Image: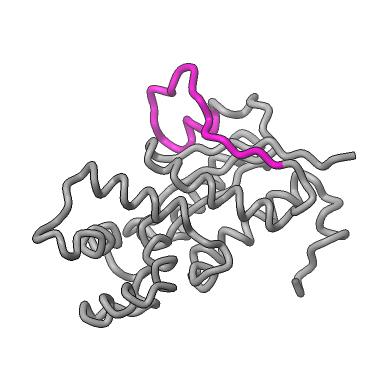
Amino acid sequence: MIEYWQCGFVGEGPSDNRLIPVLEDLLMQLRPAADIVLEPHRWIEMPADRSVAAKVQALKDEPYDLIFVHRDADSAGWEARAQEICSAAKSTSDKRLVPVIPIRMTEAWALADLWSRDDFREWCSGEELTFTSFEKKANPKKILREYLSRGEGGLIGPKKFADSSARVLRGIAIDGPIKELDGWRRLIKEVREAMCRCRPHLKSVLWDDNK
């Protein structure tokens, strides 16, 4: 019998959907023999309250196996955002939720992936940026925009930046430098735990604390 996962994704805005191909790659890496679908949740009616709690409440009867909830850490930190999502899950007794929390901003993950490129590392050297600084900088989006604007004579416009950054985000290699980021490591842990909550046999069959 084929193992099937129907998964939904809820972000803070439509631009967060750029992460879906990357998250799908991660799921397929964890369960390579499974049939996995991850798609943005299509709201028939968006809750008037745009909070995480309201969105989770609205999703409680949706037939997903897992629900990925994206929330940038910003200045609040990973723990605060995780608590926000976990509290929403507890309020509805929903064990399917997976917090997707890039530390600071999603663009920190894009910067980490770019680290595999020689020209980007050279550019970072000139800007006094290191790999470990990406999750510490207050505005990774600004750094990404500056890099993508090199040779343009100024910052690229919002639309060009949106298109260019989307290509970078969709192309993140899950076995690349991103795997060294704290936020990414925490994501993998959250995905595994959610899968095991929903299908307890996975923990004893495949995953233990030493893997």
Q: In this view, does 52 lie to the left or right of 96?
A: left
Indicate whether residue 59 is drawn in magenta: no
For the N terminus, the image quarter is top right
Q: Give the range drawn in magenta.
A: 36-57
Q: Which residue is drawn at 76% across and 52% down?
A: 196
Q: Which colour scheme is used?
A: one colour
Across the whole image, how many numbered discs are drawn on residues? 0
Q: Residue at x 53, y 30 (%)?
A: 41
Q: Residue at x 43, y 23 (%)?
A: 47
Task: Give above or below for 27 relative to 173.
Answer: above
Q: Residue at x 76, y 70 (%)?
A: 209
Indicate whether residue 48 is drawn in magenta: yes
Q: In this view, does 175 lie to the left or right of 65?
A: left
For the C terminus, the image quarter is bottom right
Q: Residue furthest right?
A: 1
Give the image quarter of residue 131: bottom left
Task: Give above or below for 47 relative to 69.
Answer: above
Give the image quarter of residue 121: bottom left
Say which of 82 and 40 sits in front.
Answer: 40
Q: In this view, does 124 lie to the left or right of 19?
A: left
Q: In this view, does 152 lie to the left or right of 105?
A: left
Q: Position of residue 182 (x, y in %)?
A: 50, 69
Q: Which residue lies furthest to the top in this view?
A: 44
Say which of 4 and 51 sits in front.
Answer: 4
Q: Where is residue 146 in the image (x, y as percent from the top left)?
A: 20, 62
Q: Where is residue 210 in the image (x, y as percent from the top left)?
A: 76, 74
